[in-house]
Amino acid sequence: METIGIFYGSTYGMTEKSAEKIKKAFGNAKVDLYNLKDATVVDIAKYNNLVFGTSAWGIGEMQDDWEMTIDHLTEIDFTGRKVALFGLGDQKEYPESFVDGLGTLYCRLPDKSCVVGSWPVEGYEYYFSLADKDGTFLGLVLDDHNQADLSDKRISDWVKQLKKEFI
Ligand SMILES: Cc1cc2nc3c(=O)[nH]c(=O)nc-3n(C[C@H](O)[C@H](O)[C@H](O)COP(=O)(O)O)c2cc1C
C-alpha cells in the first residue's frame, strides 16, 4: 500500500487522539500524521491515500483549521487518489446536528468521486446529521463523549476496510 497522509483539525485534542489511534491501527503501513494547523496544501498533495478528520462545531461547521484549508483543495488534482473521512461529535448534546462537520467536509471537497470509507449508521442515536447520506455515514463517526468504549473497535474495523479500499 502507498504511504498514507492523515490530516486532522482538532480544537481540544479529541480528533487528534483519534487520528493517532487510526495511524496505529494501520500497523506496518507507512503513515504520516499532520495537524492541519501546521500543514499546507502542498503537504496534502504528496499523498495518493488520504485520511481527513474533523470535529463538529456550530451549525454544520467543520473544525476551524479545515475552514482555512478547504478552498485550497481545488489546487490539487484528485484523479487517482483515495480520500477517507472521519468525524467526531456528540450525539447526546447535538442530536440535531450530529457530526455535521464531517458532512460539511464532504460537501466542500472539490472531487467526491475519490471518497472511500463509508460507515454504517447503526449503533448511533441522533435526529439529523449532514454526515448521513441515504442511511450511510460518509466516513467513520466517533463519539468519545458518549461511546468512548466503542471507538477502538470502530477504528480497527474501519482501517481494515481502508486497507482494501486504498491504493
Ligand atoms: C460549542 C460547541 C459546539 C459543538 N457542536 C457540535 C455539533 O453541532 N455536532 C456535534 O456532533 N458535536 C458538536 N460539538 C462536539 C465536538 O465536536 C466534540 O466535542 C469533539 O469531540 C471535539 O473534538 P476536538 O477536540 O478534536 O475539536 C460541539 C462542541 C462545542 C463545545
Image (cartoon, rainbow, N blue to C red):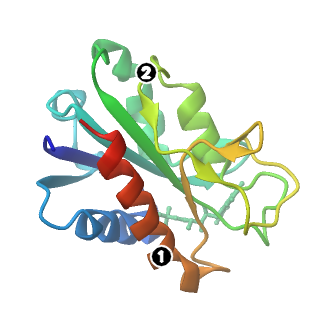
Q: Which residue is mark 2?
A: 71
Residue 162 appears left or right of 131: left
**Residue 14 appears at what percent x and percent y?**
46, 70
Q: Residue at x 69, y 67 (%)?
A: 90
Q: Quadrant of ligand 1?
A: bottom right
**Camera sees residue 12:** no
Q: Is residue 21 visible?
A: yes
Q: Is 124 or 34 nearer to us in this picture?
A: 124
Foreground pick, 80 / 143: 80
Mark 1 closeness class: few <14, some 14–19, many ≥20 residues within 10 Å: few
Q: Residue 74 got which mark?
A: none
Give how far across and how far down residue 123 sits, in percent.
73, 69
Q: Which residue is mark 1?
A: 153
Label 1: element kind: helix
> With respect to residue 25, does 140 lie above or below?
above
**Is residue 18 found left or right of 112 in the rendered image?**
left
Disc 1 residue type (three-letter): Lys
Residue beneath the point at 74% across and 66% down: 124
